[in-house]
Image (cartoon, grey):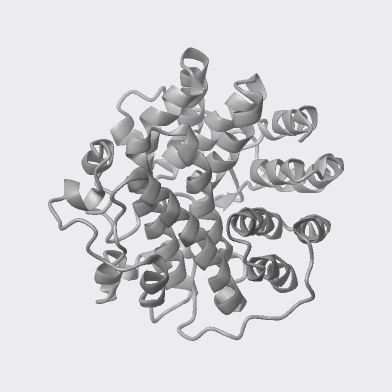
Amino acid sequence: MSDGILDEAYERLHRTGPEYQGWLTNHGPMAVEALARHGHQQRVHRWLDDYLGRLDELPRGLRPIDDWRVALGDAKRAGDWLAYFDRELRKHPWREVLGTWWPRLLPGIAAGATHGVIRVGHAVRALEPAGGNPQRLAELGQALGYWAARWQPVPGAGRLLDPTLVAGASGRSLAAEAGQPDNDGVDVATALAGLPRIDDQSGGILARLGRLPDVPRWEPALAALRPALTPDEAERGLATLVHRAGLDYLRFGHAAPVMLVHAVTAPTAVLRTLPALDRALWAPSLAAAWAATAAVTSVYAPTDGTTPPIVPAATPAEVFARAARHGDEHVVKLADAVLDAHAATGDERLLTAAGYAGQLI
């Protein structure tokens, strides 16, 4: 990956806000990181030339963040949150800041339709090879600030993601911390298959998430996944969640081609962030990623899926090249995610998911 091109792209993007037109997510930092990661640096600035025109300016702050608990989830304080994390990352090592804030932000994983955690995952991946250069530290700060400003819980997931349980999960599972039986539950594939659907699938994600508490089977289904007993189990569970969600996109993607991408990219972001975190946070991270994927699936996927499309076989490089030529940020990010899953599993069907998104979007 060409460090210089990505850093130049970050500099251009950091003059813009994390959202535009009031609530739409700025996908620029995530898309350019994926393009550069997969060797398409020559497309980065041309892609940005087209994309930047739709974005808003960087939001101004109102006042410094003092009581972070009060300011969490207050979108009007976006400028304050961006300034706060800029200061924190100038004073402290980035892994220290991430380790402090990950358990605080994790219960609000639905932030910005899960784009808060997704942007953090891309930022962490960009930092790992290059270290803490100013552009990449700034990107992590803006990603964390966006997540904090839009912090939003998944309805019904409070017990799974209670901040005190997340922060205190020192190697034990969340179920054990909550006084529940360890390892009581079902595997990822069974848990996904058991998710209910909201009856009224209209409106945006905020309206749809608000309907989940009225679904009688929602909370039992959310609690059904077998909790991880060890960090290694959590990592395997996350990898399986990304794999199965990628296959589910083939079945359900036609119903909401853009929004169901996030059922795949949110757990991918969490999985990518694990190596930068204390292992004690891995089990809570699986629980949060599961809640995000489950919620997106329940509010956007139909009850009955379709037969997965059959497309000619392609190499991973060809799959991403097609996504890059397509140019839509969601197509690019889904290709990026399923290529990771394909590398881990060898499941060729995942490569089909990227092409399918390109057909639908």
Report whether 7 appears left or right of 254.
Answer: right
Instruction: Work out whether residue 142 can be spotted.
Output: yes
Note whether 27 is above or below 139 in the view shown.
below
At horizontal 53% and vertical 39% (from top left) the residue drawn is 120
At horizontal 78% and vertical 61% (from top left) the residue drawn is 315
At horizontal 75% and vertical 46% (from top left) the residue drawn is 38
- Out of 263 and 130, give the one closest to the viewer: 130
Question: What is the x, y in percent for residue 334?
Answer: 64, 59
Q: How many marks?
A: 0
Question: What is the x, y in percent for residue 149?
Answer: 44, 39
- Out of 211 and 290, give the one closest to the viewer: 290
- Out of 109 and 80, give the one closest to the viewer: 109
Report whether 68 appears left or right of 1.
Answer: left
Report whether 25 appears left or right of 48.
Answer: left
Question: Farthest residue toward the top?
Answer: 91
Note whether 51 is above or below 83 in the view shown.
below
**Quadrant into which the C terminus falls:** bottom right
Note whether 4 is above or below 56 in the view shown.
above
Report whether 285 appears left or right of 361.
Answer: left
Question: What is the x, y in percent for residue 136?
Answer: 63, 27
At horizontal 58% and vertical 60% (from top left) the residue drawn is 345
**Quadrant into which the N terminus falls:** top right
